[in-house]
Image (cartoon, grey):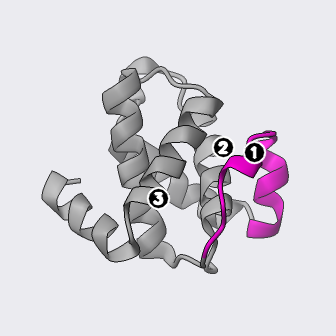
Amino acid sequence: MEDINQLELTAYILVVSRELTEYKDKTIENYIDILEDEFEITPVRAILNKAKTQLYDKIEPRHKLNFNECINYAKLIFYYLLKRYKKLFDENQIVSVAKMVFNDNSVRNAEEKVIELGL
């Protein structure tokens, strides 16, 4: 996987969130498994179109993230989504939580928080 920015990661997360439809299957582990598959299937240049959202102006791409950094951020995003919205969340909530996670956590801080939370 090539390095991607926060906006592209949010697009991948939006696509992945649509793929899990069974309530019982909505776990962080399942979301991350599908995200890793999506990284392999969909090229970065195509993900923004595949996500099909108008909410991109709310995410400011700051720098490129490698695979491990993406996974750490994604774990935190899905953790907060599942904690706050009990497995039922929409595009606005995903983008809002992603923005919060990116703004509140540096790359190093995100990694430490994932370890601290046992994700």
Residue segment shown in magenta? 44-62
Label 1 – label 2 distance at C-alpha: 5 Å
Residue placed at 41% from the left, 43% from the top? Answer: 78
Q: Looking at the picture, does residue 60 appear above or below residue 94?
A: below
Q: Secondary structure at mark 3?
A: helix
Rendering coords of residue 37 (x, y %):
56, 57
Decide: is 82 above or below 69: above
User: Which quadrant would residue 85 be assigned to in this image?
Assistant: top left
State how far apart marks 1 and 3 are (Cα). Answer: 22 Å
Whether residue 96 sits left or right of residue 77 in the image: it is right
- Residue at x 60%, y 63% (from the top left corner): 6
Instruction: For the residues labelled 1 and 2, say whether their Cβ atoms are less than 8 Å apart.
Output: yes
Q: Image height check: is 109 above or below 103?
A: below
Residue 90, image x, y percentages: 59, 26
Q: Determine which of the numbered discs, if any, sits on residue 51 in the image.
A: 1
The residue that label 3 is drawn on is 103
Task: Identify which amino acid the numbered label 3 is placed on.
Answer: Asn
Seen in the image, is 8 located left or right of residue 83? right
Which residue is label 2 attached to? Answer: 15
